[in-house]
Image (cartoon, rainbow, N blue to C red):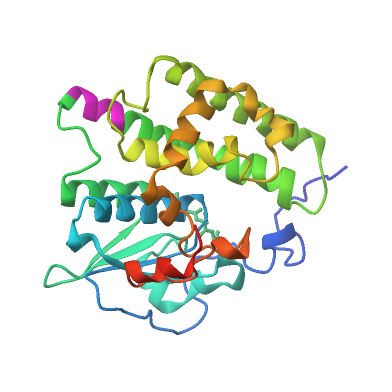
Amino acid sequence: MYIPPKKWEWDKENGGKFSKINRPISGSTFNKDLPVGKHKLQLYSQGTPNGVKITILLEELLELNIQDADYDAWLIEISKGDQFSSGFVGVNPNSKIPALVDYSDEKPIFVFESGSILLYLAEKFNHFLPNDSRLKVECMNWLFWQMSSAPYLGGGFGHFYSYAPEKLEYPIDRFAMETKRQLDLLNKHLVDKNFICGDQYTISDIAIWSWYGQLTLGKLYSAADFLDVSSYKNVLRWAENINLRPAVRRGKIVNKVSGDPNYQLRERHSSEDFKKINF
Ligand SMILES: N[C@@H](CCC(=O)N[C@@H](CS)C(=O)NCC(=O)O)C(=O)O
């Protein structure tokens, strides 16, 4: 049994998969500028659930023929520590993907936190956000729900079930219970709805699908059986439906470095890049 010392000290070797990159100090560790491509929107990301939220939304905007939503997506490989470069930290002092720079204005606009980026883009282009004020509140409720709930799924359940150096019953049990409670909540919420806020597909669907949709489709942490995801029938129906959208099929493979190598587009600079993928 672990008995915490009087004062916590940083043990570089402890911490499992991310022990080489996690530090108790914020800030950059090396000097390197970020690359800048030809579009006004420059995304610095990796195709994790937080990352694909943004590429899915951008692909949805492009699907509506909004040319100004075209973007360059540069890979920030988090297992290699790319998020600690001076350039990346200059855009997001929190050193976590995704981060976006919008060069549409005279002075670049830096946007970080995936929820903030979703809202920024939805408001900028006036799509995927309800105009009706009641529905907009509901959409925001669920967007903020996702932002505060997913760390229990990713940082809690996913970390201890998949990444931690030892399988420990207590944290796995605690976070599996919370994850299943969240899935049950979504399942009840979606019983009579096509989308999270009713009939309209919004950024709250994109945010929640990227985590809970992909989890239910068996794409996260190889935990489909363990969590019995197929029992959440309404979540599954909603997740499968969204998974069929062309923009989702494209967005979810951008900046991806894990899973099937045939469905990984490490960088995206134009719609032509998807021609490399055999969908
Ligand atoms: N709340 C943040 C979370 C971002 C986040 O945790 N990103 C992870 C990948 S999904 C990351 O960059 N991890 C690298 C690290 O922790 O060093 C958001 O939604 O943007």
Q: Position of residue 144 (x, y in %)?
A: 37, 36
Q: Main secondary structure of the magenta part?
A: helix
Outermost residue toward the right?
Answer: 1
| Location of residue 62 by image quarter | bottom left
Q: Relative to 245, is 22 above or below?
A: below
Q: Position of residue 247 (x, y in %)?
A: 36, 50
**In the image, 41: left or right of 250?**
left
Q: Is residue 22 visible?
A: no
| Location of residue 132 by image quarter | top left
Q: Residue at x 70, y 39 (%)?
A: 223
Q: Relative to 179, is 79 above or below?
A: below
| Location of residue 136 by image quarter | top left
Q: Position of residue 171 (x, y in %)?
A: 73, 37
Q: Residue at x 72, y 48 (%)?
A: 162
Outermost residue toward the front?
Answer: 278
**In the image, 36: left or right of 49?**
left
**In the image, 105: left or right of 47?**
left
**In the image, 243: left or right of 40?**
right
Outermost residue toward the left?
Answer: 106
Front residue (pair 145, 215): 215
Q: Residue at x 20, y 32 (%)?
A: 130
Q: Relative to 66, is 205 above or below?
A: above
Front residue (pair 279, 251): 279
- Give the tally of numbered discs: 0
Q: Relative to 196, is 128 above or below?
A: below
Magenta stretch in the rendered image: 134-139
Q: Residue at x 56, y 22 (%)?
A: 233
Q: Which quadrant is the N terminus positioned in?
A: top right
